Amino acid sequence: MKIKLEPLHVAGLIIFFLLSGGFCLASGKLSERKTFNKLYDYLNRDDFFRAKVLYDSVGKRLSGENKLFVEAVLDNAFNKLEESENKINELLKRKRFPDSLKYKLYSIRTDNAVKLFRYKEASDAIAVILKNYREYPNKEELKDYENSLKLLTALKDVPAQRIFIKDNSAMNTRKDKYGLNTLNVSFGEDSLNMVFDTGANLSTTSVSTATRLNMKIINAEINVGSSTSQKIFAKLAVCNKFTLGNIDVYNTVFLVVPDSLLIFPKQNYQIYGILGFPVMRALKEIKITSGGEFIVPEEESGFTGNSNLAMSGLRILIDVDGRPYCFDSGADHTQLYYNFYIENKNEIEKNYKLEKFKSGGVAGIEEYTGYLIDHTFNVSGKEVTLNGIQLLTKKIHHDESSYGNIGHDLISKFNSMTLNLHKMFIKFE
């Protein structure tokens, strides 16, 4: 059973690179135009890893606005948010900068502000997009922005999330009856087991649990996208404080969904809450072992080398075999997407037959036509083979850009995983 929110469409929180072809901001030399266009193409497809390699080799020689634009995007993707914002400020001062790219910069500004918990700044940036740049998003993206504006406007007076790591914390995870990993979370004198899920864009709970824990519910109703085409409605709530081990977390925003989406009386099963990306990112570094330990060090471990994690909005991307995949610790199984199919189409169609299978989330289950394939991934220098992976032959989200979703079946092949969303790396051992 797979129960999780995938609010991919609560996001003007997502960066949209919409133009079909690249172009150079300055006339420059032919070599510079080619370099910028290639970088632009990678950025357009959320392929930040190859963009970073190309930029480090030849892109640093770009001039003026070309260089600032690429750096603003890459800084956002690799969690250098203040640096990204400084470059956006500089670019927006320049009168000759085209509106199509100003639109992109305001999208990135929204994302930077959300991750820094500056909700009013984020809502202001979306308001500018909707007022001045409506011709650039398509209809689906406009709906995303309008929905996100409702969410962020409702949060504009909420203080920034804060976290205090008082000492090293080592907690034991517990699997619930459907195999989801949970952590014990303390709310004053009350405590509950909550799912932790890097694939959840926002932390989530039910109406009854939010009421039980005295969360401050914000009376704003928003549409929340799921992994299916259906929509569900949610409110927002702010948890003043909760504790994980030796860690206190303040002012966490939760999506509050109807009880029916998280409580299943016939199965005697309930999900009390999901701790999503904003909490995981605030912890900076976590280590999860095959024995079920969840470790948060007071001091981050050292790391050398290129970042193998990046962010597309609130989605974590991992570099696997030089391609971007979503990383989702809450997914039971790895799934491959349309981009993987197109790149490997001839080999797949030669060796596998089309099948039908089901996939979905809290808003429902949908049937897809695709392939069940075997594939070997290279992860942390080790070859890992998975059998019977679902491969979709059509996009299931309008903004889908990755090659697939890495789930627990691959993670479980290792003894431990260290995830650092500050320095943007992941290590499997």
Image: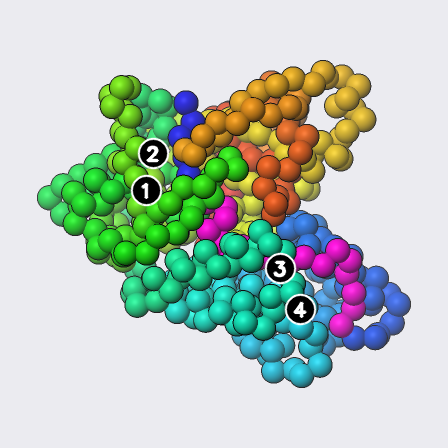
- State left or right for residue 198 relative to residue 370: left
- The Cα atoms of the two marked residues, 1 and 3, are separated by 28 Å
Which disc is residue 261 wearing? 2
Q: Earlier in the sequence, mark 4 or mark 2?
A: 4
Q: Earlier in the sequence, mark 1 or mark 3?
A: 3
Amino acid tagged 2 = Leu
The residue nearer to you, when weighing 172 against 93, is 93
Residue 95 screen position, x and y as percent? 67, 83
Quarter of image, res 119: bottom left
Q: Is residue 37 magenta?
A: no
Residue 392 higher or lower than 284, as above or below? above
Query: Which residue lies at the image location 35% right of the left edge and 47% below the top edge?
Result: 234
Tell me whether the residue at label 1 lies in contact with that at label 2, contact meaning CB atoms closer than 8 angstroms: yes
Query: Which residue lies at the image location 43% right of the left edge and 46% below the top edge?
Result: 224
Specify few, some or many for label 4: CA neighbours under 10 Å numbering under 14, 14-19, or 20 or more: some
Q: Residue furthest left?
A: 189
Residue 132 higher or lower than 339, as above or below? below
Q: Secondary structure at mark 4?
A: helix
Q: Earlier in the sequence, mark 1 or mark 4?
A: 4
> Which mark is nearer the camera, 1 or 4?
1
Q: Over which residues does the magenta segment extend?
A: 7-25
- The Cα atoms of the two marked residues, 4 and 2, are separated by 39 Å
Query: To which residue does mark 3 refer?
Result: 137
Residue 425 screen position, x and y as percent? 52, 47
Q: Is residue 8 magenta?
A: yes
Query: To which residue does mark 1 refer?
Result: 257
Query: To which residue does mark 4 refer?
Result: 101
**Residue 44 seen from this side:** yes
